[in-house]
Image (cartoon, rainbow, N blue to C red):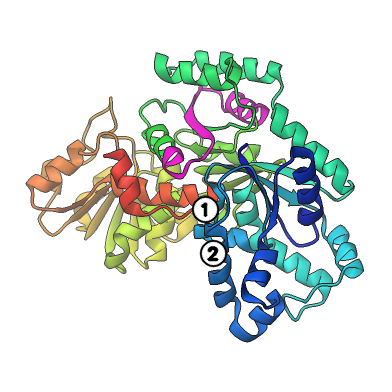
Amino acid sequence: MRRIVLTGFRGTGKTAIGRILSSRLNVPFIDTDDLIESGTGRSIPDIFHYDGEERFRSTEREVISTLPAADVIVSTGGGVVCDPKNMEYLRRESTIVLLVADIDTIEQRLIKNPRPPLTTLPLHEEIASMMDRRRRNYYASADFCTDTSETSPAQAAETILVRLREGVPTTTQRNRALEFFRTGRLPPPPLKKLEDILVGATHDPTTRIMGVAGYPCAHSRSPRLFNALFDHYRLNYHYTWFEDPELDEIMEIARAIDAKGLSVTIPFKHDVIEYLDEIDEHAAQQIGAVNTVVFACGTAIGYNTDWLGVRKPLFSMKGAKAVLLGAGGVAAGAAYAMKDLDMDVTILNRTPENARKLAERFGCAWGTWDKFDGIKPDLVVNATPLGMQPDTRNPLREDQLYKDLTVFDLVYTPPMTPLLEAARAKGCRTISGTEMFVEQAREQFYLFFSIDVPAEKVKEFIA
């Protein structure tokens, strides 16, 4: 039996539900907090008080790394989801069930069964603050969610068993999804894989589907990368292409099959916002574009990781004079990153009105494409699709390139674009779109699973 791991805030019922599942499935039950206390001979509050949280987390990590790999029910501490190494151990060959409850319910349960406080705040405020702080990690930990607010432990355990046995999507929903994928441009082998997952004789109801949403998106390397990462970390997931000209069709299918998440590409990075329940208050709201959607506990949350993929390769160029080519969703993330690095940015676009709108949002200069020659920037970032197969045009003329210029082409298919080839011939420093792809994909994987993938591992899988 695949290991079942229960995560969630204190008071959501992990121990009581875990023991019932253990009895129903006739496998052992392990509480990681109990293991820590028995192994150290000390209470968890005592470890926190005298040694600090860092020491406790180190001990917790050691305990989790030694857990049985299968045929066991595991209940975890409330903060275990915040440690990427813990999640790497816990997610391997496991199904993780996130238990949730509303704040009032948790408060009443903790009043009846008092536990040492985690902060100096009043109990209700402490619960709200800690749950909000951990919410992103809780959602990333979840293969399935179960709300225990108005259920007994026995009822919650039965709900979990049904989901493990039957999954979330109905047979009708899975067949409808298969028809959707058949209308796309999936090659025969990936399509056959989806058929097996959705309706095949060996169909596993706990296998979750994810994918890249766009039109077109068949060129995307995300399926290759994510499926390789799933194999590496032993995650029961499959990643594919959600290619369709209608975004509402994509989102309907994703929700119907209980998709874990989507990577969103052109032309949907702005339009997808209206289909979401929340967007990240920092990047996505300010950028106005979403490239990552996480589905968890009935909620769809949008994030933007593009800007991090742009920012990291340019970190050494703080304060540079820069030109940003393009004014779409990718350009918005790039502009946000470049302004975060205190760059003097001019946005150029063939449609001046679009350049003006984006520039006004981020406090940049703007102009038409022909203004490039008068700027003499230190850096040029291409955020247009020019250079992406099959449109392999160069967004700049060769005479507009010079030795002291750094050229960052956000197009990553092909890895060596016409712009980068011309820039290298002129002696420019060049940064390929692969660098952006690697960094934004690492952040996406963390949002999806709370696992911190090394950059070298991502590069290995897309090489």
**Residue 61 bears which disc, if any?**
2
Residue 425 at x, y = what percent? 7, 45
Using the image, determine if residue 134 lies above or below residue 256: below
Using the image, determine if residue 407 lies above or below residue 77: above
Q: Earlier in the sequence, mark 2 or mark 1?
A: 2
**Residue 89 bears which disc, if any?**
1
The residue that appears at 22% across and 59% down in the rendered structure is 377
Residue 339 at x, y = what percent? 40, 62
Q: Amino acid at mark 1?
A: Tyr
The residue that appears at 49% across and 43% down in the rendered structure is 291
Q: Is residue 328 magenta?
A: no
Q: Residues within 10 Å of mark 1 (few under 14, many from 20)?
A: some
Using the image, determine if residue 113 lies above or below residue 440: below
Residue 196 at x, y = what percent? 53, 18
Which span is picked out in magenta?
Answer: 229-257
Nearer to the camera, 349 or 202: 202
Q: In this image, 451 relative to 397: left or right?
A: right
Q: Residue furthest bottom?
A: 50
**Residue 100 bears which disc, if any?**
none
Asked if the residues shown at circle 2 and circle 1 are in contact, with their CB atoms under 8 angstroms apart, the answer is yes
The residue that appears at 51% across and 13% down in the rendered structure is 182
Q: Residues within 10 Å of mark 2 (few under 14, many from 20)?
A: many
Q: Secondary structure at mark 1?
A: helix
Is residue 389 something one can see in this rendering? yes
Q: Amino acid at mark 2?
A: Arg
